[in-house]
Amino acid sequence: MKRTLLSLAVVLSMTNAVWADPLSTEQQRQMRNANRKIWFGVVMMAGGAVIAPLTALATEANGKGQTMKAGVGLMIAGSAVIWWGASERRRTLDPQITVGVSLGRGNAVFVRRTW
């Protein structure tokens, strides 16, 4: 009995990997674009993180904080680009399917797949 349950568990755990579809060329392109956005956002955040402390001393000396504000803005924009890339990557890998039924004068069944 234990051997049967173990073999069943192994077979069920492997079915998802066996039946999984490889990414199409369009999905691969979308994944590359999403990864580029993530890396670009990381570079923007790193640039802002370097600019902010380096200009903090100059800000105290001249009383203007324009460069410091630019560094913080760069970090905020970088985090937004990272979020954009991550959400695009999630939509590429996990599209959503919505099934609906419309009843009334005209009956209809619709299936909508969104990415």
Image (tube, helix red, strand yellow):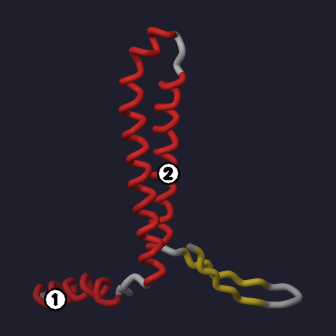
**Circle 2 residues within 10 Å: few <14, some 14–19, many ≥20:** many
Quadrant into which the C terminus falls: bottom right
For the point 22% across and 89% down, the residue is 11
What percent of the width, then of the height, locates residue 60? 45, 10
Which tag, 1 or 2, sits closer to the chain's start? 1
For the point 19% across and 84% down, the residue is 10
Quadrant into which the N terminus falls: bottom left
Amino acid at dot 2: Val
For residue 47, the mark is none
Q: Total number of numbered labels?
A: 2
**Circle 1 residues within 10 Å: few <14, some 14–19, many ≥20:** few
Mark 1 vs mark 2, CA separation in Å? 45 Å
Task: Kindly indicate the quadrant of the structure image that contains residue 58.
Answer: top left
What percent of the width, then of the height, locates residue 19? 34, 89
What percent of the width, then of the height, locates residue 87? 49, 60
In the image, is 41 to the left or to the right of 111?
left
Q: As displayed, is residue 60 above or below residue 105?
A: above
Q: Nearer the viewer, mark 1 or mark 2?
A: 2
For residue 7, the mark is 1
Front one among 32 and 13: 32
Front one among 10 and 90: 90
In the image, is 88 to the left or to the right of 11?
right
Could you tell me if the residues under marks 1 and 2 are in contact, i.e. CB atoms within 8 Å?
Answer: no
Amino acid at dot 1: Ser
For the point 59% across and 75% down, the residue is 114
User: Which element type, helix, strand or loop, lies under badge 1?
Assistant: helix
Q: As displayed, is residue 5 above or below residue 79?
A: below
For residue 81, the mark is 2
User: Which element type, helix, strand or loop, lies under badge 2?
Assistant: helix
Task: Kindly indicate the quadrant of the structure image that contains residue 93.
Answer: bottom left
